[in-house]
Image (cartoon, rainbow, N blue to C red):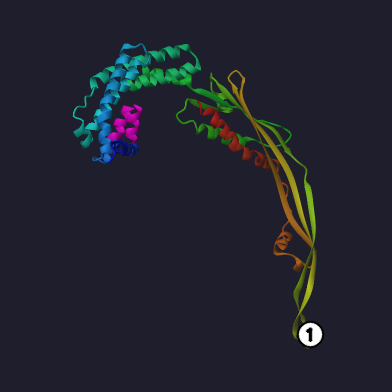
Amino acid sequence: MNTFYKSFTIAFISILLFSCSSGYKALKKGDYYKATVEAVEKLRDNSHSEKAQYVLLKAYPLAQKAAMREIEFASTGNEQNKYEIIVAQYERLNYMAEIINNCPMASELVKETPTYPSELSKAKINAAEEAYEMGLKALNVGTFTNARLAYQYFIKANKYNYGYKDVLNLINESKEAATLHVVLEQPQLNANYQVSPTYFYDKLASDMMNTVGARLIRYYTFNEAGNTNQLRVNQYISIDFRSFAIGEVTHKKQTINMKRDSVPVYEKGRNGETKVVYITAKAQYINNLNEIPARGIITVSIYSGTNKLVQQQTYSHDYVWSTEWGKYYGDDRALTEQQRKMCRLDPQPYPENQWFFDQCNNPLYTKVLTYLKSYYKKY
């Protein structure tokens, strides 16, 4: 075989071989840590994998060098989070050594896997002090945004060294300063109709409070806010049922002349015998329909603690209530079965205003809740 084509074939096969390995892809991209971890994981599943063996032998020494280089740069630099970087790199070095030593094939291939427990311990102490000081600096600024930053720093400090100095108290202090306090105000409603938005409001308040999770946010009903002394309010949610209108009753009537041929009628003859006579049955069917339209418009507004409008959204929904029944004149045998059923119905009484209100606004509930969840997700 021509030397050129032989070399090309070998190279092509090698590309196909290694392209199937994500560890190899990480190696080619220079992510030696990821390549090492993925190679070891593959060797656990298949200790004879030549691809994984190749990647591990190439990537691990490079991952070590990269980590030590980052540690050296951070140690001699002036980065604010220098010890955080050092901790992360020592943790990488120790983790790679651990997974290699716990994998038989990997430990056979790599004979030396140095660990740095004492260096990591010292770095964590320094990282705790580093995060602690940055947290104090942020907290002393006194703003809501910096309080959130301080809270994250104190959490880090406690992670590196649990109970470091007074960090547990500072976590609580910064958390309170960083928590967004939101009051769900009493709904506004047009007084022309005797209706109540209580169900809508109570359900919204309950669902909002149940979606907080681990985020730094707390919701209050207007009653809770009124009963809480010295509450620091960051935002208000205003629910304004801007418009609710019930239209006039409209009556629609449709008259249909019905006719059915060959309807059997049983008659008795002179001699007492029963005979069948076929007739044409006729009737006039009247379909009645009463409709009442209603429309609801709701506006959701979010205001800052100083009553400045932050964001607003308006939704609307149209609803039509109807009742339908039938009536006929003539021979009911000319009617369809459905028409007979309609004739047995009576017109339904008109619903109360509250029922119309709920029918208009309940479909908007999901939209309102989705909007608020989306807005407060960033907190």
- Quadrant in the rendering for residue 128: top left
**Residues packed near mark 1 inside 10 Å, few (<14), some (14 to 19) or many (20 plus):** few
Q: Position of residue 201 (x, y in %)?
A: 60, 34
Q: Is residue 36 magenta?
A: yes
Q: Nearer the viewer, residue 118 or 288?
A: 118
Q: Is residue 200 magenta?
A: no
Q: Residue at x 47, y 27 (%)?
A: 215
Q: What are the residue bounds of the magenta stretch? A: 21-40
Evaluate whether residue 199 shows in this view: no
Closer to us: 127 or 31: 31
Q: Quadrant of the N terminus?
A: top left
Q: How many marks?
A: 1
Q: Nearer the viewer, residue 370 or 208?
A: 370
Q: Is residue 369 above or below residue 282?
A: above
Residue drawn at the location 26% of the way across and 29% of the way down: 58
Majority SS type along the magenta span = helix
Q: Secondary structure at mark 1?
A: loop
Q: Is 112 left or right of 74, judged from the image as shown?
A: left
- Give 95 or 60, whichever is nearer the viewer: 60
Could you say where residue 129 lies in the image, as x and y percent from the top left? Answer: 34, 14
Amino acid type, callout 1:
Gly
Q: Residue furthest bottom?
A: 271
Residue 361 image position (x, y, % from top left)? 65, 38
**Residue 41 location in percent, x, y?**
29, 36
Q: Is residue 317 above or below residue 264?
A: above
Q: Which residue is disc 1 drawn over? A: 269
| Up-down relation of residue 77 to residue 247 (above or below) | above
Residue sitting at the far front? 2
Left or right position of 28 against 103: right
